[in-house]
Image (cartoon, coloured by chain):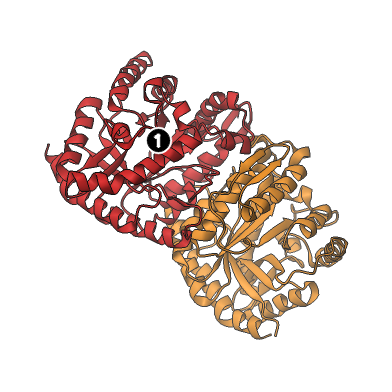
Chain colours: A orange, B red
Amino acid sequence: MANIQLGLMTRGQFPQGDDMQLRFEEMFEQIRLADKLGFSCITKGMHYSSWPLQDAQMVPYLSRVMAETKNMRLNMGIVLLALHKPLDYAELVATMDVLSGGRIIFGAALGYREVELKAFGVQKKEIVRRFTENIEAIKRLWTEETVTMKGSFFELDEASCSIKPLQKPRPPIWIGANADPAIERAAQLGDCWYVNPHSRNETLIRQLEVYKRALDAADRPFPKEFPMRKEVFVAETREKAIELAKPAIGLKYKVYHSWGQDTVMPEGDNNLDLDWEELLDDRFVLGSPAEVCEQLLNLHKTLGVNHIIASVQGAGMPQSQVLEALHMLGEEVLPYLKNA
Amino acid sequence: MDMQFGVMLRGLFDWDDDMKVRFNELMEQARLIDKLGYDCITKGSHFSTYPHQEMTQIPFLCRIMSEAPNVRLNAGIVLLALHNPMEVADYFATMDLMSGGRMIFGCALGYREVEYKAFGVEKGTGVTRFEENLEAVRRLWTDEKVSMKGTTFELDEARISVPLQQDPHPPIWIGANADVAIKRAARLGDCWYLNPHQKVETLLRQMDLYREELEKHKKPFPKELPIRREVFCAPTHDEAVELAAPYIKGMYDAYKTWGQDKAMPAEDRDITQEYAELARDRFIVGDPDEVAEEYVRYNKELGVNHIIMSVQGVGMPQGQVLDTLSLVAEEVMPKVRAA
């Protein structure tokens, strides 16, 4: 049996002018439903200055929604780690792990947007060093009583993480990566590569080899849990699913393009300023429940991923459609994935 | 008299304590505080607290939002010189939204070497960073988009990600011990958040400074003036002292190792004295009548109208905390309100 886990990303991004109080109530409703239906985790991403979208900040958001769910893991997917300080995040994440009863997944990646780098006073040329040092410091703070370590932008002088994570030795570290060198870094530093949602499958099949070679070089086994995020659009029929996806994907990818996401993606797969029909090709999971089952199983077979995190709500998609999609995924797709 | 009653959940425990159990106890405290009609729950912020454990402020306040749906939530205080303004502005915008506009933003400089080093902040740059960060946070909260060049950040048409619920923004309380810091609080904050460590006598002297500085900047005296204090209440005076003293003394020994005294004015700097001497004019510990009288005195002498009580010192058993919370709500609150 494949036993593929299905998680839910509540993106929490909404057009300007939307009533965010109302949208939050709706997201909480989605989360309670997902918990009941047997989804594996709630995932929230991180961006600053997300205009023209409204967004919720990950750490407060996940800390609040953990009260709405008893079973699901809480996936910080992903923290822009090069922007932050290691003692800060070691303590934030450890506290969240204790408050949630050991349900935290720590996802981390570099970050790429100019407005964010500037706002945090981080030079582009420093980000890899900052990221690498931060990961090392956080691992040590979680597992050692006191830590002395001099990084390029911080100094731990017998510093302690004020609270240790509940999960032992520590929460899983997933590393998000688009570009080949980032994937190699994920193999060296992370518990797994958290496969990104933007690349085409053929690109990912090539990059899987990059990942495996880097694991071999670091003498590390292939991870037991291999997660991937995907945009998933499910409806009674493929035609209806396409109608569902159209406005959501169109807006979302125009925004990514304006943020510069494509500048960090592999050559030949880096033009996100396309018409939605072209974006659809090989990039999204889309169709009737049976077709979605087929496509998810295919991802498992070709890439080895066994935890797929579905983004269901495109920007502006009404709540009723989201709940309907969650029901289909939970009731028709999940049982199939568990027994495939 | 008009008085708000707040509670600080310090969340500081021994290094080998089971934090999952302690957290469940804090949740029980939060539910009781909300039910008894207190006005706010406060959580402080410190990093690297060995040999104590502490829960981190922002996740903690967010987690208890659902347990305590009525009280205001006071981040008291954020060590603002250590953090980035974009991050802080955005976190509090999300928190204000999720709590339905219940956030209070407390901030101060911080003083511990280990924290400054860990955040890569040179001690001599703390004041500059604090002032720039506060200006940036305020502008991010009130302007549609912000361009501003600080010494360690550059906002380039940056914006917060969700609008604030409170108009124009959550109240900005500035924690201050030293005279210069109090002047800064007058100039930059919505109010000075009076500290728990100084004697009333010292605070009275500093209140004159605060008023002078407010006048200099043509700012009115704040409508809300909060203070934090160590508070403990039991049916009799002797019982209250006996139950509370060892834990309060323990806290002050910990503050000493952190170097808190170095950030305080000279007259109050000795915090290693015996409990009785330490307590005088500094802690509010006694039977309900005594505690109520002190609350009234603080209001009359200092003008404070929001007293935030820290109850649980490291190791104080849960039952004792719940008892004092109930006693203050049932016997002290009505007396103070009637005064």
Tell me if residue B45 comes above or below residue A20 in the rendering. above
Tell me if residue B39 comes above or below residue B193 in the rendering. below
Q: Which quadrant holds residue B147? A: top right
Tell me if residue A185 comes above or below residue B146 in the rendering. below
Q: In this view, does A264 lie to the left or right of A159?
A: right
Q: What residue type is labelled 1?
A: Pro
Callout 1: 10 Å neighbours few (<14), some, many (20+)? few
Q: To which chain does the residue with label 1 belong?
A: B
* Residue sticking out furthest to the left: B338
Q: Mark 1 points at which residue?
A: B168
- Residue A193: x and y in percent read 74, 62
Q: Which residue is drawn at 57% across and 33% down?
A: B113
Q: Is residue B188 left or right of residue A255?
A: left
Q: Nearer the viewer, residue B208 or B138?
A: B208
Q: Which of B231 and B86 is in front in this view?
A: B231
- In which quadrant will I find the N terminus of chain B? top left
